[in-house]
Amino acid sequence: MKVHYGFDSLPAFRSPVVTVGSYDGVHCGHRAILQRINEIAEQNNGESIVVTFAPHPRIVLGKAEGLMLLNTLDEKMVLLEEVGIDHLIVAPFTEEFSRLSSEEYVRNYLVEKIGVRTLVVGYNHHFGHNKNGDFRFLQSLQEECGFEVCEISRQQIDDEKVSSTVVRGLIAEGDMAHAMRLLGRPYILIANLKEYVADPYKLLPPNGRYRVQIEGQGAAVLMISHSGLNLDFASMFNLEKPIQIGFIERVG
């Protein structure tokens, strides 16, 4: 996966199939959209593209109080690459950007900068100033602007709605096994445990002991406490650089 920062130096994409959003958690609902853009790109010899924003819009707009995210940008990159996305565009979110109308956003960025041929959105996708852009608005522009738009319906697992909000609630309760079912994989944390500095917006489970999987190194037990993060038998693991920790279940 190639990562592009901003819109000013983008390559000429081949039949770009695009989706836009924060994609916090890259849960099973998100994965339905991502799978669809990959499928359409493959069918049309195109490229799949995700556009996301940094920093998070709530931070820029002064609404960061209580904000807890499932993924840092680095973690999101790992998950999107795992799904098989061709390109990630990290768009700098500014107050000026937040004032764009829905039509300016579509025409000036998705059409002019990216050259979108197919746009795939979730059932509740809203965008533009005051979030007044939606699927029907996109349908009204598609013929004139030369793209097709596809909407993915709400995703459920065993009649349970899949959303970032639901997953956050489960993780805040320490129910990592349930969260893993909605995420489609273990909840991840990428961190340097020897020099751990907590990200102020990264959601961690409550204090306790957790069975985890260390990417490339095997199973472990991680203790989360007020003093930080500690692995049982830490000397058995290479902790000289950041590691990827996947939470399986709470064990104490």
Image (spheres, rainbow, N blue to C red):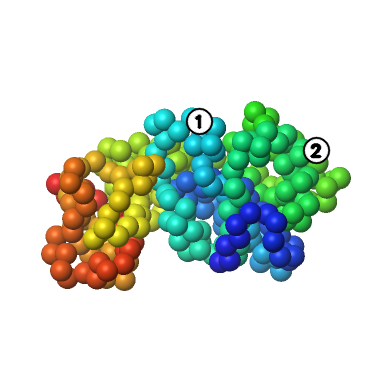
Residue 34, percent from left and from top: 57, 55
Q: Is residue 107 left or right of residue 184?
A: right
Q: Position of residue 249 (x, y in %)?
A: 24, 51
Contact (Cβ within 8 Å) of mark 1 with mark 2: no
Q: Quadrant of residue 184?
A: bottom left
Badge 2 amino acid: Ser
Relative to 242, is 106 on the left or the right? Answer: right
Residue at 51% across, 42% down: 56
Q: Residue at x 24, y 41 (%)?
A: 206
26 lies above or below 133? below
Residue 101 at x, y percent in the picture: 73, 34
Q: Real-space Cα distance between discs 1 and 2?
A: 32 Å
Q: Which residue is mark 1?
A: 62
**What residue lies at 66% left-to-right and 49% top-to-bottom?**
120
Point 36% across, 42% down: residue: 200
**Which residue is tagged 2?**
140
For the N terminus, give its image quadrant. Answer: bottom right
Q: Residues within 10 Å of mark 1 (few under 14, many from 20)?
A: few
Q: Work out whether 37 lies above or below 235.
A: above
